[in-house]
Amino acid sequence: MSCFVLAAFVLYSWLADRLSPAVYLSIVGLPQSGKSTLLELLSAICRQPLFVTDISPAAVYQACHQFTPTLLIDEVEWHSSKGSGSLRQLLRAGTGRYSQSLRVRGSASSFGPKVFSSLEPSPDPALNSRCLQFIMTETQKGALLKPDHPSMLTFASDLRQRLLKFRFNNYSSIRPATFPGLAELRPRSRDLFACLSAPVAGVKNFSQSLLDFIRDHHDPTTREPLGIGMDAMLAIVFEFLHQHPGSSVRVKVLAQVANSFLRTRNERLVFSDKLAGTTLWNLGFQSKKRTNQGWVLILDSETVKRAHQLLKTHGITHLSQSDLERYATICPICKTFLGPPNS
């Protein structure tokens, strides 16, 4: 399946300047697992490859601005220096076609397809949600040809000619792909599929395999966890929703329960009534009203819908799996999101 998706990426790279957002691949593996070999192979058949082992953010901007390459960066060290934070920021911005970086001497864009290899995944959840990740393992097949073998070079040269013709024939008509079942993916996963599948939109089996891969391997990794305060407050609201459906609860009570909950987990955060109300608002809970006892959160259908949407999008780290399975036995929406409890 990985080879299948990599083939889709190669095709996509030849039309990437017509599609947005840019697709990234993250190649992760131990030393001698074949990361560099894979990048060498991709550099032989992707459009306008730029294969580097070290590159500054300024050089990335310059290269992407001048000739929109397929940028392949080998052995990225995510924790090596302060510059790694700048690189992650640049990579995040580089998925957007119209994202520009302003400097004294002008502006530049880092937009374009990219592949980067590393010993471990990026610590940046936002970046990880923008790329497809592949885990490499060392092969035991000793007879495999290297990318620089003469027969491989001949094959790659012929393939590039065919791919160039493919680009000429499809450049003006290429569009992001649509496909049945796409709505079940999260937004960034839908975007990645639409771009990767665009060059083969007419091949149903190809598109279905891509959809299956992204749904099963990428979509679950796009969850960006909430901060401690938001996550704890959502856990408390989730409990009240299932214990007292259709009622209401004072924001003051939510703050007290949340503080008790956080103390049992040795968290230092303390909710005031005002902070609790602000947190609920930031989470998108809008069914609140002022009473003679203060603000209350109404546990109506809108609150139920929003709480489960947040669960699906971000998860709730302050709830155990047993809690979630318990909810699934009494809540039809939880059954949809979580499935039935384990037998």
Image: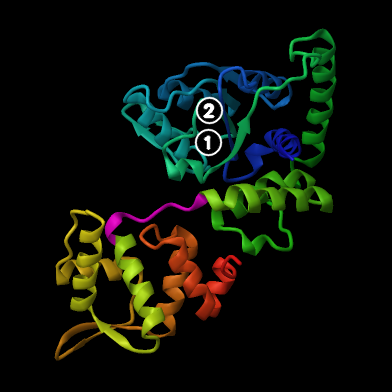
Which residue is at the far front?
343
Identify the residue at horizontal 46%, vertical 34% (top origin): 122
96 over 288 or under it: above or below: above
Q: Which mark is residue 64?
A: 2
> In the rendered structure, which amino acid carries the disc numbered 2?
Cys
Q: Earlier in the sequence, mark 2 or mark 1?
A: 2
Q: Position of residue 38 (x, y in %)?
A: 67, 23
The picture quadrant where one finds residue 302 is bottom left
- 266 left or right of 302 in image: left
Quarter of the image where the C terminus is located: bottom right
21 above or below 278?
above
Q: Is residue 121 left or right of residue 85?
A: right
Q: Nearer the viewer, residue 298 or 93?
A: 298
At label 2, counting other C-alpha atoms closer than 10 Å, the crowd grade (few under 14, some 14-19, many 20 or more) is: many
Q: Which residues are magenta?
A: 222-229
In the rendering, at what x and y percent does residue 169 appear? 82, 38
Is residue 124 rendered to the left or right of residue 169?
Answer: left
Above or below 238: residue 266: above
In this figure, what is the number of numbered marks?
2
Residue 175 visible in rendering: no
Task: Tell me: 270 left or right of 49.
Answer: left
Depth check, front residue: 47 or 144: 144
- Please identify the quadrant where the N terminus is shown: top right
Q: Which residue is mark 1?
A: 111
Residue 292 x, y percent position in the rendering: 14, 91
Q: Is disc 2 in contact with disc 1, using a CB cutoff of under 8 Å?
A: yes
- Quadrant for residue 185, please give it: bottom right
